[in-house]
Image (cartoon, rainbow, N blue to C red):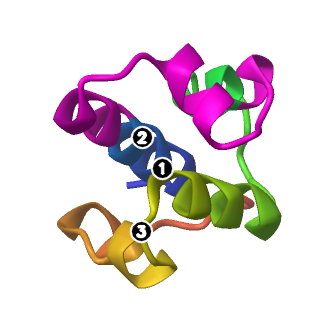
């Protein structure tokens, strides 16, 4: 699975678990709605680490918790 797809699925899973919309997630995490939308639609192939940090801080989870998911077990490179 490509990293962009894994991140997209993780964000959608988090939104479902917390019963929030992607727009609400953007507000909580101090990110623009377009940033979240680009992550969800996989337009962002190489998101900045700062974006993931803001997601984690807004959700009160660690980066370990974010990436500790089967989705990230076999990531394919985006640049190949």
Q: Which residue appears at 57% of the width and 22% of the height?
A: 41
Q: Which residue appears at 73% of the width and 38% of the height?
A: 44
Distance, label 3 to label 2, CA atoms, is 13 Å
Query: Percent from the top left, x then y, of residue 73?
Result: 28, 76
For disc 1, the marked residue is 7
Magenta stretch: dominant secondary structure: helix
SS label for mark 2:
helix
Q: Which residue appears at 76% of the width and 39% of the height?
A: 30
In reply to whether residue 20 is colored magenta, the answer given is yes
Q: Quadrant of the C terminus?
A: bottom right
Residue 74 in sight from this viewpoint: no
Residue 64 in sight from this viewpoint: yes
Local crowd at mark 2 within 10 Å, few (<14), some, or many (≥20)? some
Query: Percent from the top left, x then y, of residue 56?
Result: 54, 62
Nearer the viewer's eye, disc 3 or disc 2? 3
Asked if 22 appears above or below 54 in the picture, the reply is: above
Q: Are marks 2 and 1 in contact (CB under 8 Å)?
A: yes
Query: Percent from the top left, x then y, of residue 6?
Result: 40, 51
58 or 76, which lies in front? 58
| Left or right for 74, reference 2 | left
């Amino acid at each position: 699975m490509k990293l962009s797809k894994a991140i997209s699925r993780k964000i959608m899973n988090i939104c479902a678990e917390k019963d929030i919309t992607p727009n609400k997630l953007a507000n909580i995490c101090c990110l623009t709605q377009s940033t979240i939308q680009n992550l969800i639609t996989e337009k962002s192939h190489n998101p900045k680490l700062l974006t993931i940090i803001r997601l984690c801080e807004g959700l009160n989870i660690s980066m370990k918790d974010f990436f500790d998911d089967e989705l990230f077990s076999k990531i394919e490179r985006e640049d190949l």
